[in-house]
């Protein structure tokens, strides 16, 4: 990706963050602006309803003492009442004819064409209020009853600008505060989005660097949030990639060296045979035997590499109940010819019922590799002891020898691929440095553990522990 495209991508990410934060802030400010005003307005409505309904009831109660509602009688009653602050008071008789109007005496004697009065003459209590144009407009109406029944209706109207101005003033101040908050929020959003996208951009750039093969690249974590955790995970992943790459390169180098050595020897011997026209038969047979030996070593190394490759790829295996004691006994018999050639004695002690869940071939390979190494790296007249025993919920295999031993500084590395304690002597014995690595991987894949330690007298002891297989149905012993 070019620098121009990366810059455009960063700008798009910043814009999305800014738009998201801006939208959220605008929504919050809108709620903060509207909710107080709506709550204040509803509170005024409630207060108006209580106040006007009460005043209307007082007027209606005062007029209920009159047998008939006339202009004179109603005027006398109204002059005695404290009705200051009302915009208009209208009193009608039962036929909706106006008998009193505080706003205009010319309306007296005319029919009052007000919906509130019509509803009040039907026996209903009416209240209505509205906030608009800088004023609270409120209306209320009640029927007037006398001893003879419904005698009329009373209607009052109030215009309140004081509370309306107060609410409008609060609303104006809220808008000013919101505008300041919005501008500050926009500035903070720009700063925050740039800081956030800068960290994401650094993480993306680091990924591109690692993708290019620089596994030593690291990110310096900043802060204490999710991006910091992501950066730490990236560093851990890069560290593992670096270790894996180093191991891969060493493996390729060691494998190439292991394969190149026998191939070079085969080629040298073959060239010697071709170029020597007068080579005697004994020498030729010796050279051919050496070629066969090198070819055999090449074959063994190739087979072990293939085995490691299949194991790394997680190839499926046939898992069954296998008796580790039988595998140990069979291996001791199989290894005896090699041991006899080297004047090494082999003994085996195997308890009954040492069953583990494993692939039979894999389990035999584990025992054989350990026993073969114990014989090859032993001394003339030495001993190899193989044992298998049940220890609680574990089955333990032990292979001991009285051989040359392993230096303490080499102990942590002997299960690494192509690692050899004595490279020259290992090649003489036909070793490739892969046997113990295969054993270790096989043991771990079966849920077991392997340990190596020097014997107190002389030699080495390998201990392998497996989980014991469960009993078979029917109560068979394991």
Image: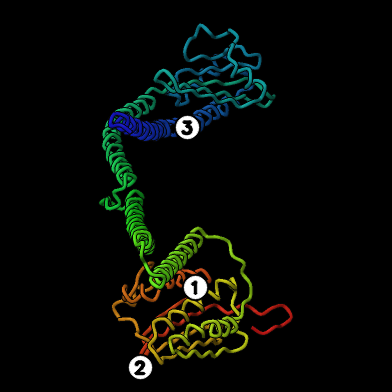
Q: Which residue is mark 1?
A: 443
Tag 3 secondary structure:
helix
Looking at marks 2 and 1 on the same chain, the residue that comes earlier in the sequence is marked by 1
Q: Residue at 36% across / 72% down in the picture?
A: 427
Q: Is residue 315 left or right of residue 256?
A: right
Q: Quadrant of the N terminus?
A: top left
Q: For residue 25, what is the image quadrant?
A: top left
Q: Is residue 72 left or right of residue 38?
A: right
Q: Residue at 35% across / 93% down in the picture?
A: 457
Q: Look at the picture and state if 338 lies above or below 318.
A: below
Q: For residue 115, what is the image quadrant?
A: top right
Tag 2 secondary structure:
loop
Q: Residue at 35% across / 84% down in the picture?
A: 405
Asked whether residue 177 is in view, the answer is no
Distance from disc 2 to disc 3, alpha carbons, whole Å, reads: 97 Å
Q: Given this view, does label 2 or label 1 mark the residue nearer the observer?
A: 2
Tag of residue 42: 3
Q: Residues within 10 Å of mark 2 (few under 14, many from 20)?
A: few
Q: For residue 144, what is the image quadrant?
A: top right
Q: Given this view, does label 2 or label 3 mark the residue nearer the observer?
A: 2
- Residue sitting nearer the eye, 70 or 44: 44
Q: Is residue 391 left or right of residue 268?
A: right
Q: Which residue is mark 2?
A: 457
Q: Quadrant of the C terminus?
A: bottom right
């Amino acid at each position: 990706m070019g620098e121009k495209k990366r810059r455009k991508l960063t700008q798009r990410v910043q814009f999305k963050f800014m738009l998201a934060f801006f939208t959220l802030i605008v929504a919050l400010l809108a709620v903060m602006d509207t909710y107080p005003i709506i709550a204040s307005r509803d509170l005024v409505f409630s207060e108006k309803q209580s106040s006007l309904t009460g005043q209307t009831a007082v007027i209606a109660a005062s007029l209920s003492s009159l047998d008939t509602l006339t202009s004179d009688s109603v005027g006398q009653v109204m002059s005695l009442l404290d009705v200051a602050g009302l915009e208009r008071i209208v009193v009608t008789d039962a036929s909706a004819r106006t008998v009193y109007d505080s706003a205009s005496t010319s309306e007296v004697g005319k029919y009052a064409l007000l919906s509130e009065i019509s509803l009040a003459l039907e026996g209903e209590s009416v209240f209505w209020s509205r906030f608009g144009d800088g004023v609270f407009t409120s209306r209320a109406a009640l029927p007037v009853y006398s001893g003879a029944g419904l005698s009329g209706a009373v209607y009052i109207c109030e215009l309140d600008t004081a509370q309306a101005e107060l609410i409008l003033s609060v609303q104006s101040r809220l808008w000013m505060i919101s505008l300041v908050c919005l501008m500050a929020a926009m500035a903070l959003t720009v700063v925050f989005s740039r800081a956030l996208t800068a960290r994401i951009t650094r993480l993306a750039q680091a990924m591109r660097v690692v993708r290019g093969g620089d596994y030593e690249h690291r990110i310096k974590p900043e802060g204490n949030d999710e991006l910091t955790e992501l950066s730490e995970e990236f560093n851990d992943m890069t560290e593992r990639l670096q270790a894996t790459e180093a191991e891969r390169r060493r493996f390729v180098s060691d494998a190439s060296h292991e394969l190149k050595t026998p191939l070079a020897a085969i080629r040298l011997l073959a060239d010697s045979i071709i170029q020597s026209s007068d080579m005697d038969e004994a020498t030729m047979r010796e050279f051919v035997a050496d070629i066969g030996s090198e070819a055999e070593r090449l074959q063994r190394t190739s087979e072990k590499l293939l085995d490691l490759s299949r194991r790394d790829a997680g190839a499926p295996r046939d898992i069954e109940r296998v008796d580790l004691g039988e595998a140990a006994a069979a291996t001791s018999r199989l290894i005896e010819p090699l041991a006899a050639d080297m004047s090494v004695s082999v003994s085996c002690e195997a308890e009954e019922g040492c069953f583990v869940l494993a692939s039979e071939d894999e389990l035999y390979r584990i025992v054989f590799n350990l026993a073969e190494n114990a014989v090859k790296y032993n001394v003339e007249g030495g001993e190899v002891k193989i044992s298998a025993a049940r220890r609680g919920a574990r089955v333990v295999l032990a292979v001991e020898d009285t051989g040359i031993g392993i230096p303490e500084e080499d102990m942590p590395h002997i299960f690494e691929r192509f690692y050899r304690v004595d490279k020259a002597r290992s090649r003489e014995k036909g070793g490739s440095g892969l046997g113990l690595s295969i054993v270790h991987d096989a043991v771990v894949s079966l849920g077991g553990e392997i340990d190596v330690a020097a014997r107190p007298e002389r030699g080495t002891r390998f201990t392998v522990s497996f989980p014991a297989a469960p009993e078979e149905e029917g109560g068979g012993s394991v």
